[in-house]
Image: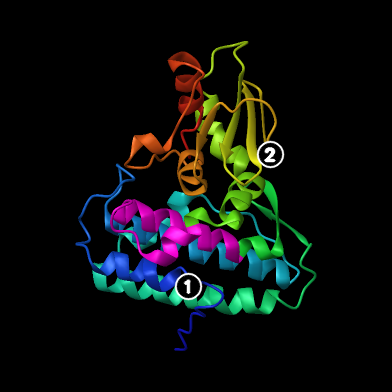
Amino acid sequence: MNRQIDDDRFPEWRPFVDAVQRRRPDAGTWCEAWTVRDIVVHQAGNAEEIARVLAAHLDGEPVGTRGFEEREGPLRALNDADLWDALFDRMATLNRIAEAADDVPQDTDVAWTGRIMKVPWFAEHMREELVLHGWDITGDADIPAALKTGLADPWMTTHSVVAVGKPLLAKGTKQLRPGERVEARLRAAGTDDVVISAETDRTAIGLSEPEGSATLETDPAARVLLLWGRKPADPSRICSRVGPETLGRVRGLLSGY
């Protein structure tokens, strides 16, 4: 079987694999409920589902996105060696489907988990998963250069906001009281602000030129971690003058999935 995975298309793939291989499958991660093995299950399921949905669209027979348990359950039943093979097989399939997708209009809309994504976002979403969960395995201190660069790259923030933003706020929004509203500007020098507003029945997230005071200021990589419900090991990377109540509400909203 051809298990080619293009380093140019998925530059974060090999650093992710290296990070996994340096740890035991049962080792804990910064995603506190998951071990390294759990992350491998999740990534194999992500690659399988992204490829399945995109391939179905390319074939003119769209399918709905399966939930995590449906796609990950069979993977959890595998032993460690077979799970590792499954990850490589599914990534190779995704590589092949993403290559085929280069031939369709790149602004084509495709349904994905209750929202719409553009065709190029599918491969990009897998890249984002590799970066984020690679960080979950290594943390800040041991993160490979390619994953560290990915966290800080503008595409990572843009994808998190434009393609995934509203789902990222859904968990935190459930914690809001009726009538409560949270607004925030997350600023990183030299970039657009990430602007967020949330109430119990609606959310909005987007990019905007810096204006006025920021709710918090940080660097681009730490801001991505915050959007995904993570936090950098060094808390001094996050600066704020809005006070503990407001900052606490914003941090509570940023709970990730």
**Residue 76, image x, y percentages:** 32, 58
Residue hosting label 1 = 91
Amino acid type, label 2: Gly
Is 236 part of what is drawn in magenta? no
How many residues crowd around disc 2 within 10 Å: few (fewer than 14), some, or many (20 or more)? some
Q: Residue at x 22, y 61 (%)?
A: 25
Does any portion of residue 32 appear in the rendered image? Answer: yes
Figure coloring: rainbow
Q: Earlier in the sequence, mark 2 or mark 1?
A: 1
Residue 35 vertical placement versus 53 (above, below) = above
Residue 182 vertical placement versus 161 (above, below) = above
Amino acid type, label 1: Met
**Residue 50, image x, y percentages:** 57, 63
How many residues crowd around disc 1 within 10 Å: few (fewer than 14), some, or many (20 or more)? many
Q: Which residues are magenta?
A: 123-150
**Residue 84, image x, y percentages:** 32, 71
Q: Nearer the viewer, residue 147 or 178?
A: 147
Using the image, tell me which numbered label, if any, was put on residue 58.
none
Q: Nearer the viewer, residue 98 or 240?
A: 240
Pair 2/1: label in front: 2
Residue furthest to the bottom in view is 1
Is 22 placed left or right of 93 in the picture?
Answer: left
C-alpha gap between disc 2 and disc 1: 30 Å
Residue 180 vertical placement versus 42 (above, below) = above
Residue hosting label 2 = 206
| Callout 1 secondary element | helix
Quarter of the view holding residue 208? top right
Quarter of the view holding residue 222? top left
